[in-house]
Image (cartoon, rainbow, N blue to C red):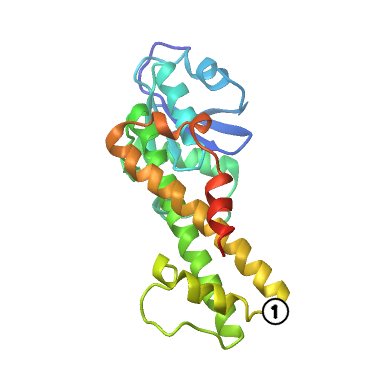
Amino acid sequence: MSNQAHYKVGCDAHKRYSLFAVLDGNGKVLRRRRIDHEPGAIRAFLSPFPPGTPVALETVGNWYWIVDEIEEAGCVPHLAHAAKAKLMMGYVHKTDKLDADGLGLLLHNGTLPSVWIPPGELRDERELPRTRMTFSKMRTQLKNRMHATFAKYGLSLDTLSDIYAAKWRAELTRVIGRLPEEPAAAWSRSWSCWTWSKVRSTAWKRAFSSGYGSLRPSNWSCRSPARRRSSRL
């Protein structure tokens, strides 16, 4: 590879492979290369380029490790906002070649809609609040489903407060007993899942201030808390 430092590289990343387009100082595509996603393959392809060579890729779901390999090769990753980049490229038809070329050209023109790339340690830590958000959404969906089951059969509790609070447990059990067998079984299963997600979400929240060791799989069970609580219904 030449020692010239004016290369720009566009990367169209997919689940199992990435297509790279290498542009020269005039924005002309010199070559394209498909790289299968194997450990070290992207790093090996980019290593011959001069240190600091910019590489553009979109915010696809698997960009974490691709950015790591770009950095290990001595290149500089630039993460592009996928929706904005698509609009700016203006292609009617979307292909791997056009996407890779387009990202490289945006990088060459200085118009790439870049987003901030957080450090690797921060990227890892972000998985914890994202997981808690998932559990919170799950709890909301399950509660809405349980409310909908009661509504289908014209059942309700005589209260405007949270029917899942401990003080309403006896009344809730009575109402569940008025459901047909199959909906009652489905309601109880939803309750078990809701209880489990609540326990896990609470554990995640507490871990943020006390360290993450308690979140390791060996330190908790996803079965017993929900089963113990659901058995009371």
To which residue does mark 1 refer?
180
Q: Where residue 77 sits in the image (x, y, percent)? A: 38, 29
Q: Amino acid at mark 1?
A: Pro
Instruction: Give the x, y percent position of residue 197.
Output: 49, 52
Q: Secondary structure at mark 1?
A: loop
Displayed quadrant of residue 203: top left
Furthest residue to the right? 182
- The image quadrant of residue 57 is top left
Residue 196 vertical position relative to residue 116 in the rendered view, above or below: below
Query: In the shown orientation, is residue 180 left or right of residue 173?
Result: right
Q: Is residue 187 above or below residue 136?
A: below
Residue that appears at 56% across and 77% down: 174
Q: Quadrant of the C terminus?
A: bottom right
Nearer to me, 14 or 132:
132
Q: Is residue 196 left or right of residue 117?
A: right
Q: Which sits in the foreground, 189 or 48?
A: 189
Residue 61 position (above or below residue 53): below
| Image vertical order of residue 148 relative to residue 86, above or below | below
* Other-residue count near label 1 (Cα within 10 Å), few / some / many at <14 / 14–19 / ≥20: few
Residue at the farthest bottom position: 154
Q: Residue at x 34, y 38 (%)?
A: 207
Whole-percent x, y for residue 4 in the image? 37, 15
Q: Closest to the observer: 101 or 206?
A: 206
Whether residue 55 is visible to the viewer of this picture, yes or no, is no
| Picture coordinates of residue 20, whole percent (x, y) | 53, 30
- Residue at (39%, 16%) from the top-left corner? 74
Q: Who's the residue at 50% across and 34% down the image? A: 11
* Residue 11 visible in the picture: yes
> With 231 as the anchor, is 181 left or right in this view?
right
Q: How many marks?
A: 1
